Amino acid sequence: QSVLTQPPSASGIPGQTVTISCSGGSSDIGSNYVCWYQQLPGTAPKLLIYRNNQRPSGVPARFSGSKAGTSASLAISGLRSEDEAEYFCATWDGRGGVFGGGTKLTVL
Amino acid sequence: EVKLLQSGAEVKKPGESLKISCKGSGYNFTKYWIGWVRQMPGKGLEWMGIIDPEDSDTRYSLSFQGQVTISVDESITTAYLQWDSLRASDTAIYYCARGGQQIVNEAFDIWGQGTMVTVSS
């Protein structure tokens, strides 16, 4: 059971905006930066968002992150078929890193 | 180009030992933490531990403390993950990833390709 709670699945149609939530507590999300990873089938995870809302170079502006209190969200606007993947949130809990359970995004 | 290149797939028997590797290139290896992440078949990501290549300061998740050993050889810019006695439940893909620049709780910005470890009698 993951420390951070994510919905197991999400879906949307091309062009739509989808939001994935990540819920934690005061000792993890509440006290640390949140990041988000995208994992396409059969590949290694890729960093999408770091420090709550920062995008590494090369990540499209369609991906955005936010954090409020002990929860965080990843928004994907202008949904595309290639966004179909699993998304994981992550943060630190004082001792080490923690991941969310992952959200499988389906593009209908 | 910044890269982490992991060693190849392994098939082992329960009770055997194993050491897998992760070689960094294209950046100053000693300046960035290196972490290890487990992904069991069909499951999510699990944070295992992280090491500072500069002084070998190592932090383990409680779930993996005492179960694995993380080490580094900075002379060959390589990090390692090892088991003394494997179990079937260690079957998984193991990823190494580059962490923060001298900051332990940063995101992993570069990932290795993963090493598949299969433990079966």
Image (spheres, grey):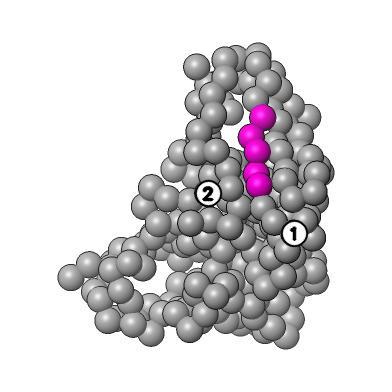
Q: Which amino acid does label 1 sit on?
A: Ser
- Identify which residue, B95 or B78, lies in the foreground: B95
Q: What is the x, y in percent for residue A71?
A: 72, 46
Are discs 1 and 2 both within one chain?
Answer: yes
Residue at horizontal 69 percent and vertical 65 percent from the top: A93
Is B54 within the magenta?
A: no
- Position in image of residue B99 (x %, y %): 70, 63
> A72 or B87: nearer the eye?
A72
Task: Give the residue at mark 2.
Answer: A101
Residue B56's disc is none
What span is in magenta?
A19-23
Q: Quadrant of residue A21?
A: top right
**Label 1 marks which chain's residue?**
A
Q: Name the image quarter holding the C terminus of chain B.
A: bottom left
Q: Is residue A95 above or below residue B114?
A: below
Question: Relative to B37, does residue A86 appear above or below in the rendering?
Answer: above
Q: Which amino acid does label 2 sit on?
A: Gly
A25 and B81: which one is in front? A25
Is residue B103 toward the left or the right of residue A25 in the image? right
Residue occupying image coordinates x 77% and y 56%: A30
The correct choice, above or below, for A3 with respect to A61 in the image is below
Pick out the residue farthest to the left.
Answer: B121
Q: Residues within 10 Å of mark 2 (few under 14, many from 20)?
A: many
Check disc 1 and report the residue beneath it: A26
